[in-house]
Image (cartoon, grey):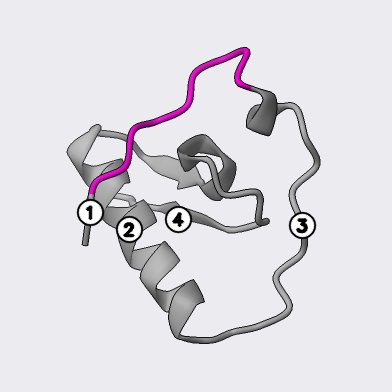
Amino acid sequence: MPVHPIRLFGDPVLRTRADEVVDFDKELRTLVADLTETMLEAPGAGLAAPQIGVSLRVFTYHVDG
């Protein structure tokens, strides 16, 4: 699972309305795994798909404890 660069304020993908998820398939599972790995590496408490350049309404979060 690759760690993706996190997009910063001003990136056009962060200003665009993300698409709804319609296919719950292998690609979505891979995206969620990549989001989780990137979030934990950052470190952070949550990360949305547009923050790694994917315009989908998907996010992951982690609460410790």
Decide: marks 1, 2 in contact (CB < 8 A)? yes
What amino acid is labelled 3 in the image? Asp
What amino acid is labelled 1 in the image? Pro
Distance Cα–Cα, label 3 vs label 4: 16 Å
Distance Cα–Cα, label 4 vs label 2: 10 Å
Q: Residue at x 22, y 54 (%)?
A: 2
Which residue is denoted by mark 2 in the rendering?
Answer: 34
What amino acid is labelled 2 in the image? Asp
When the figure is inspected, residue 36 is found, relative to residue 13, above or below; the finding is below
When the figure is inspected, residue 64 is found, relative to residue 15, above or below; the finding is below
Mark 1 or mark 3, which has the lower sequence index?
1
- Please give left or right for residue 42 compared with residue 63 in the image: left
Mark 4 or mark 2, which has the lower sequence index?
2
Mark 3 or mark 4, which has the lower sequence index?
3
Mark 4 or mark 1, which has the lower sequence index?
1
Q: Residue 60 carries which label?
A: 4
Which residue is denoted by mark 3 in the rendering?
Answer: 19
Residue 44 drawn at (x, y percent) = 32, 35
* Stretch in magenta: 3-11
Which residue is denoted by mark 1 in the rendering?
Answer: 2
